[in-house]
Amino acid sequence: STEARRVLVGGYVQTGSNCVFKVKEYDVSDTTPIEISVASSASFAAASPGDTAWAEAPDSRFVALYLQNASSLTHNVVLYDIEAQQFGAVYSMNLTSSATIRQIAWIDAQHFVMDDVNAGRRGVRVYARAGLNVVDLGFFDVWGAGSASVLQPFYGAQFTNFAGGLLAYVNDVSSPS
């Protein structure tokens, strides 16, 4: 086939107490992969990289990447534009350590979520894409008071897309009554 097939790989690179997100794109339409592009985000503080995730938007143009600095509970999110082959600004925020592993899930081409906890309530933190910038729309309480201690997310299977939104999965870890 003469149709090009592309693969996007990415993650982070740590240098000392700082990190950058990095993405490489390859053409894999032949027997030997050919590097098409490589891009790095701006550097950000992350002395102890912990949890990391990424997800492609439904329009297949943008990717949201995430990295937690485990020593400070600073969470870093950035957008990558596949078409323009460039990163936006890294958005850093302090969140509670609500999940062992966070998953990013896109609601639509403009909005994505991650599991979060606020004041003992488990819910989702919602983000919007504004160009290549991340806008934090805040915490949305999904399961109510006391839910943070009895409901835990299912690691890498926290969300599933369905028509019109997301299914959010949690495990009830409270003692049976």
Image (tube, rainbow, N blue to C red):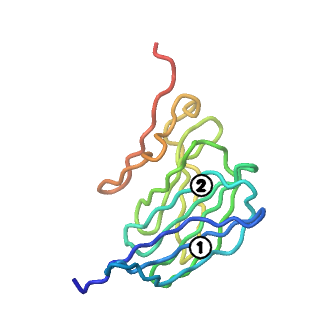
Foreground: 107 or 49?
49
**Which class describes the residues within 10 Å of circle 1: few (<14), some (14-19), or many (20+)?**
some
Relative horizontal placement of residue 130, taking residue 92 as reference (left or right): left
**Which class describes the residues within 10 Å of circle 2: few (<14), some (14-19), or many (20+)?**
few
Q: Which residue is mark 1?
A: 133
**Position of the N terminus by quadrant:** bottom left
Residue 45, quarter of picture: bottom right
2 or 1: tag closer to the N-terminus = 1
8 versus 103 height, above or below:
below
Q: Which residue is mark 2?
A: 138
Q: Secondary structure at mark 2?
A: strand
Q: Which mark is residue 142?
A: none
- Relative image position of residue 4 (x, y in whole percent): 31, 83
Name the amino acid type tagged 2.
Gly
Which residue extends farthest front?
31
Name the amino acid type tagged 1.
Asn
- Relative image position of residue 66 (x, y in whole percent): 58, 60
